[in-house]
Amino acid sequence: MESFMFENKTVLTGVKPTGKPHLGNYLGAIKPAIELGKEALSQGGKHYMFIADYHAINAEKNPAVLNEMTKEIACIYLACGLDPKKSYFYRQSDIPEIPEITTILYAYTPKGFMNKAHAYKAAVDKNREAGKPDDDGINMGLYTYPTLMAADILAYDSDIVPVGKDQVQHVEIARDIAGAINAHYGKELLKLPTYRFDENVAVVAGIDGRKMSKSYGNVIPLFEDDKAIKKAIFSIKTDSRPMEEPKNPDEILVYEIYKSIATPEQLQEMGDGLRQGKLGYGYIKNMLLDAVVNEIKDAREKYNYYMAHFNEVEEMLLEGAEKARPVAKATLKRLKDAVFGR
């Protein structure tokens, strides 16, 4: 990572509650987000991490399910090393200034931006494939998603927003809206954020060789018991070649997944064993199982503790909101003073 890239910078990440995470989420999103936050804090910056529960209601309307997913995601980030005393950790819905800021941003958001937003376009494409009207089942929450996200980003004077490839567009929209408002009032009311897109972020293969994803049902669970993790790992696709036949490790799915979690020495051991025909598939699956369990053992213990003592987590989230609100309040005041000529 570039040294001092985050010096005195504000880094913000939002995470949507989507149910139990898997190994791919952990290695590709959760762990990097926490490490990035720590990097910013170590360089005198600020780190905001929020649970995007307003975004979640576009798709999930059952309060019990929504509540459970929010609970899980909060416990996951805390279990994986997020420090709520150093980072601002809060629920989006605990910051009443966010909907107000969103309302002001709407007046400067071209409708064309929303028409081009990835999530909306994907929903329209799905409808077309199914022979349904373009906007069938699409609510305004989904349609205006990028403006609410812009409010999340701009409320806290964010400098850097780490995102995946599909989210880059959202940060650009936030920049464009902020730029339009600043230009209209002739002063810097809102800070223009930049995105940070990590090319090297881990894309973990699933047990069938496709990208690990809940929608493919090919995941290695993260916080379930060893038995469930073992069951997933032992169902990873392998061929019927005998152990003693030398194999190219890069063609072996177990090795591919192991790459994302093993140390260089461990990887070397598995690679050599396969090339020399000394390690069987059962053995290398056990090597992967050990590495996964070892990686998540402490976090799983903490996760189970937090899930059982959620009142403690609830307190942390409310404290986080209390810390974050004054910044959002100041942003809203600047906007209202300019917009209403106060």
Image (tube, helix red, strand yellow):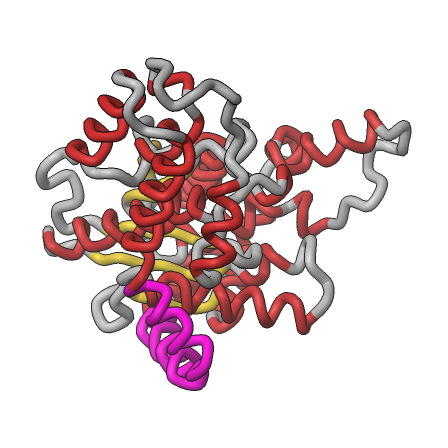
The residue sitting at 52% across, 46% down in the picture is 232
Left-right relation of 65 to 245: right
- Quadrant containing the C terminus in the rendered view: bottom left
Instruction: Tell me if I can see residue 186 in this picture.
Output: no
* Vertical side of 12 occupied by 267: above or below: above
Observer-nearest of 64 and 154: 64
Q: Is residue 13 left or right of residue 220?
A: left
Q: Residue 295: image x %, image y %? A: 29, 52
Going 18% across and 51% down the picture, which residue do you hit? 40
Instruction: Give the answer, above or below, for where 150 lies relative to 205.
Output: below
Depicted 92 relative to depicted 11: above or below: below
* Residue 342 part of the magenta-drawn span: no
Which residue is more in the foreground, 302 or 201? 302
**Which residue is at the front of the view, 136 or 206?**
206
**Residue at 15 percent of width and 39 percent of height:** 5
Where does the image place residue 140, in percent across and percent down from the top left? Answer: 72, 49
- Residue 213 picture location, percent across and down: 55, 40
In the image: residue 328, left or right of residue 65: left
What type of secondary structure mainly makes up the magenta span? helix
Q: Nearer the viewer, residue 29 or 331?
A: 29
Numbered range of the magenta stretch: 298-325
Position of residue 338 measured from the top left corner of the image (x, y, whole percent): 43, 56
Q: Residue at horizontal 17%, vertical 49%?
A: 39
Based on the picture, tell me whether residue 323 belongs to the magenta stretch: yes
Q: How many marks?
A: 0
